[in-house]
Image: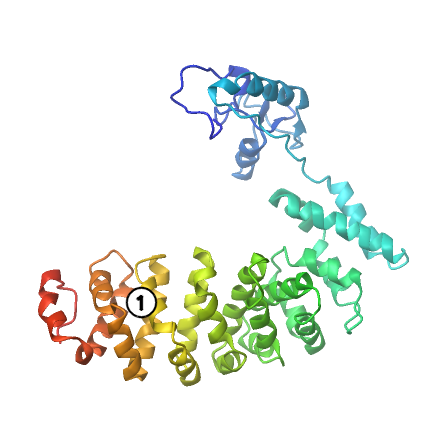
């Protein structure tokens, strides 16, 4: 049932033939299979994806998995929705049809053919990018037609400062797809390709910069080879480029999301974290910490904890006036992971600096940690909290120590 329709509302009854036989809900994108039965596209695709090869209603074998849009039924459902607006039913939007595989192949061939005019190749790539943006289904169709290999060849066909719009359009599409490990190795094993992607981090267009950062993150995360991952994180100016994207104004939120993913992936290479600190990563992370969405905030805090484990990163974090208060505030606020990372970073900071200990206590870390060890957070988070409590024992005010019995915190290691 649509979200706008209260399932307990007896004032309107959905016609039986408007319901999907699988989900029993109002169909939003009715399609007909080879047996003549009609289902909602999402339901029948899920049915087939789980390995079923028969029609759910007739049990007849599906000799052809082609899904034909039932436009007539969809229009009838839309008309019924409009007629029942008084009951809170909203008209279902006309769904976009999945990309035709033959059209995708034609566009890829048009883009790959060097004999075609540049404008024609760019136009084909722009249309492909539009299809890829529309849905996961379209991206699956595009990926199934050898798109990644074609796009990789185009992206790195001209690796200089005058790289064309053709390269940039290919880069934009490629950044939407995961790469196989051999494809990641293809990029990372060639210093010229790595240098080209790094150079694109400083392109005048923020779209090109963000797409380049996205591809760098995909490549680094998609490889198991520590040597190749280190080769990318050791590239000249790669951290400066990624930090520059993180510092881009909030009017372009994708820059923040892609920037933190790329920075985290690069910082997983321990021997080059110092380069992240030198590039201003600490300042960027603390300054933007409150702007991240949940998942990105977790990744940002994980990166902060990684940087806090090296002396230069710990010093840079300790020197920022907002670091300790923000980390204390985050405990038990965003998620279990965020709490664990924040506690870990505070543990590193307080282990290295008495000033950080005083700041943490002043910010109210005592109560936060006592609540944390009694919560349902991860065991790692609780262990970090217990270690931090021991670390801070000399900084607690006497009245705070006297009142800790009120918490009945048996999980806290005695000290």
Q: Identify the residue shown where x is 67% and y is 69%.
A: 186
Where residue 357 appears, as percent x and y from the top left, is 27, 78
Query: In front: 167, or 147?
Result: 167
Between 300 and 45, the one lying in front of the other is 300
Q: Nearer the viewer, residue 150 or 356?
A: 356
Q: Is residue 378 left or right of residue 287?
A: left
**What colour scheme has been applied to the protein in the rendered image?**
rainbow
Dot 1 falls on a residue whose secondary structure is: helix
What x and y, as percent, mark residue 204?
71, 68
Residue at image position (72%, 76%) is 192
Location of the C terminus by quadrant is bottom left
Residue 169 is at least partly visible in this image: yes
Q: Quadrant of residue 134?
A: top right
Q: Residues within 10 Å of mark 1 (few under 14, many from 20)?
A: many
The answer to whether residue 345 is above or below residue 61 is below
Answer with left or right where residue 88 lies relative to residue 326: right
Residue 32 image point, x, y percent? 63, 25
**What residue is pinned by disc 1?**
328
């Amino acid at each position: 049932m649509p979200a706008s329709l209260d399932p307990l509302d007896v004032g309107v009854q959905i016609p039986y033939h408007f319901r999907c036989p699988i989900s029993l809900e109002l169909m939003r994108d009715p399609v007909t299979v080879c047996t003549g039965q009609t289902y909602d596209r999402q339901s029948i695709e899920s049915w087939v994806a789980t390995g079923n090869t028969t029609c759910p209603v007739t049990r007849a074998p599906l000799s052809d998995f082609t899904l034909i849009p039932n436009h007539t039924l969809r229009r009838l459902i839309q008309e019924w929705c409009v007629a029942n607006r008084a009951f809170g039913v909203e008209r279902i939007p006309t769904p976009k049809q999945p990309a035709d595989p033959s059209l995708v192949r034609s566009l890829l061939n048009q883009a790959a053919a060097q004999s075609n005019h540049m404008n024609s190749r760019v136009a084909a790539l722009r249309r492909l990018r539009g299809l890829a943006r529309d849905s996961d289904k379209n991206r699956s169709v595009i990926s199934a037609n050898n798109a990644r290999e074609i796009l990789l060849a185009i992206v790195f066909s001209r690796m200089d400062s005058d790289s064309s719009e053709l390269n940039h359009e290919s880069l934009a599409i490629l950044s939407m797809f995961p790469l196989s490990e051999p494809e990641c190795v293809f990029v990372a094993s060639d210093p010229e390709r790595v240098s080209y992607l790094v150079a694109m981090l400083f392109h005048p267009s923020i779209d090109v910069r963000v797409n380049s950062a996205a591809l760098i993150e995909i490549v680094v995360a998609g490889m198991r080879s520590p040597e190749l991952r280190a080769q990318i994180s050791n590239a000249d100016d790669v951290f400066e480029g990624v930090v520059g994207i993180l510092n881009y104004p909030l009017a372009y939120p994708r820059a923040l999301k892609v920037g933190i993913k790329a920075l985290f992936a690069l910082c997983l290479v321990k021997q080059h974290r110092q380069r992240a600190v030198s590039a201003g990563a600490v300042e960027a992370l603390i300054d933007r910490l409150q702007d991240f969405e949940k998942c990105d905030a977790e990744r940002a805090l994980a990166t902060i904890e990684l940087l806090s484990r090296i002396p230069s990163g710990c010093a840079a974090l300790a020197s920022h006036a907002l670091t300790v208060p923000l980390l204390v505030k985050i405990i038990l606020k965003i998620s279990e992971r965020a709490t664990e990372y924040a506690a870990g970073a505070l543990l590193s900071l307080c282990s290295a600096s008495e000033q950080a200990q005083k700041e943490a206590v002043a910010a109210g870390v005592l109560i936060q940690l006592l609540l944390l060890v009694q919560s349902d957070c991860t065991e790692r988070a609780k262990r970090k909290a217990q270690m931090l409590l021991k670390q801070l024992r000399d900084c607690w005010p006497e009245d705070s120590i006297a009142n800790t019995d009120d918490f009945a915190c048996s999980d806290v290691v005695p000290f």
